[in-house]
Image (cartoon, rainbow, N blue to C red):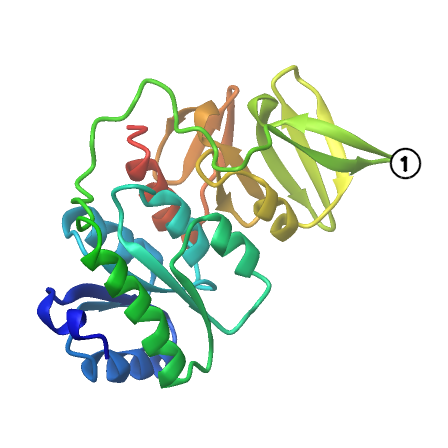
Amino acid sequence: MDPSLASSRPLTCVIIDDEPLATAVLQRYCAQLPFLQLVKTLHDAVSALTFLQATPVDLLFLDIEMPGLTGMQLAQILPANRGPRIILTTAYDQYAVQGYELGVADYLLKPTAFQRFIQAVTRVHQSFAAAPPALSLTPVPAPAEPPAPTTSSAAMFVKNEHRLQRVAFDDLLYIKGMKEYLLLYTADGGKILTLQSFRRVEEVLPPQRFARIHKSYIVSLNRIEHLERTKVQVAGRLLPVGDAYREPFMALIRAYNQL
């Protein structure tokens, strides 16, 4: 081990993973390295968001596929400059490009070998030794407008009949699922029917601006006129908030200081 690692302070870290076996492996790995200080293990991203807003830490071991708020969505919510470093831990390699676009420190595929784990955390620890530690995640006052999306695109293309139609994110009110089809409602009163899955659309939509509120609805956060426990109003229309989506949806609302 690099001698400089022994003299610098330990990294405070948090494990966020809904798989008990995976968390047990990471806990065992952390316990074997004196420059890591595990402060919390959490099993869902919503609880992690609440914890991180109150407790600054240096490093997250973040699983991607979790119910409700995914690990990738959590990574996109956390402030890029003031937040903790992130090491993604997942059994799926298809998120690697998206992870590195978010600026994660490393991407560990499960099952993760201890040697590979050491390589990832040593690199992070050395970067802290050469730079000031991350600042607190205490929320700051929100700007007048919602944060701009991390994606460089301002629109998406959807299949409509025999053509690809451009839909600007600014014009999109909400999306309704209709079996294997999606119906996109736009600000000009238009409706676009497309043969598409919710999962694919969620990969394209900027998570800072859109949220799944029900198994059949995605809404634009900027278009919400008011919300209650079981419904939201968008463009004068009341849309249901499903029980399974309520907690992660409210966490997003709190994170963006929409209330």
> Is 249 or 203 nearer to us in this picture?
203
Residue at the location (30% across, 41% down)?
81
Quarter of the figure with residue 17: bottom left
Q: Work out whether 158 lies above or below 107.
A: above
Q: Work out whether 160 lies above or below 74.
A: above
Residue at the location (55% across, 70% down)?
92
> Is 114 or 154 nearer to us in this picture?
114
Residue 158 image point, x, y percent: 74, 37
Residue behind mark 1: 162
Residue 218 image point, x, y percent: 54, 39
Residue 91 image point, x, y percent: 51, 74
Quarter of the figure with the C terminus: top left
Q: How many marks?
A: 1
Quarter of the figure with the N terminus: bottom left
> Is 234 or 100 nearer to us in this picture?
100
Please state which amino acid type lies under the numbered disc 1.
His
Q: Is residue 37 visible?
A: no
Q: Is residue 9 visible?
A: yes
